[in-house]
Amino acid sequence: QVQLVESGGNLVQPGESLRLSCVGSGFTFRFTNYLMSWYRQAPGKERELVAQISGSGEIRDYADSVKGRFTISRENLKNTVYLQMNSLRPEDTAVYYCFWPGGKVWGQGTLVTVSS
């Protein structure tokens, strides 16, 4: 059974940076085979796609709201996906979730709060 565990969420001030991590386990095949995604859900809003990355890491897509500020990356030998978040804004406040689209598996989420 696949499990995804996120970490790295915290309270930060506007303009600061955070790096989120997502470690996966239980995959049948090598981690490099799998497209992975980061989503977020802000209070009172629907969950939205933030970024996704192909198995090789060569193809990356971002929501318009985070382009130029967030970077998704992965270390396949560690079964880990990262989300580097720079120039954080109050509107980035949300619970951030790691998601494996192939198996529709979600992590438990990690809370990011951006506030002065």
Image: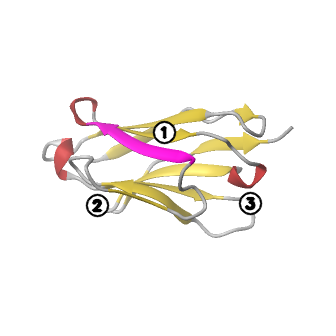
In front: 107, or 51? 51
What's the CA distance linking mark 1 and mark 3?
A: 19 Å
Is residue 7 within the magenta segment? no
- The residue where tag 1 is placed is 6
| Figure coloring | secondary structure
Badge 1: residue crowd in 10 Å (few <14, some 14–19, many ≥20): many
How far across and how far down the image is residue 88, in percent? 68, 43
**Residues marked 1 and 3 touching at CB (< 8 Å):** no
The residue carrying pointer 2 sits among few (fewer than 14), some (14 to 19) or many (20 or more) residues within 10 Å by Cα, namely: few
Kindly identify the amino acid type of the residue bearing the numbered disc 3.
Pro
Q: Which image quarter is the C terminus in?
A: top right
Q: Which mark sits nearer the N-terminus, 2 or 3?
A: 3
Q: Mark 1 vs mark 3: which is more N-terminal?
A: 1
Q: Residues within 10 Å of mark 3 (few under 14, many from 20)?
A: few
For the residues labelled 2 and 1, the Cα–Cα distance comes to 17 Å
- Amino acid type assigned to the residue bearing label 2 in the image: Gly
**What residue span does the magenta drawing correspond to?**
69-75
In front: mark 2 or mark 3?
3
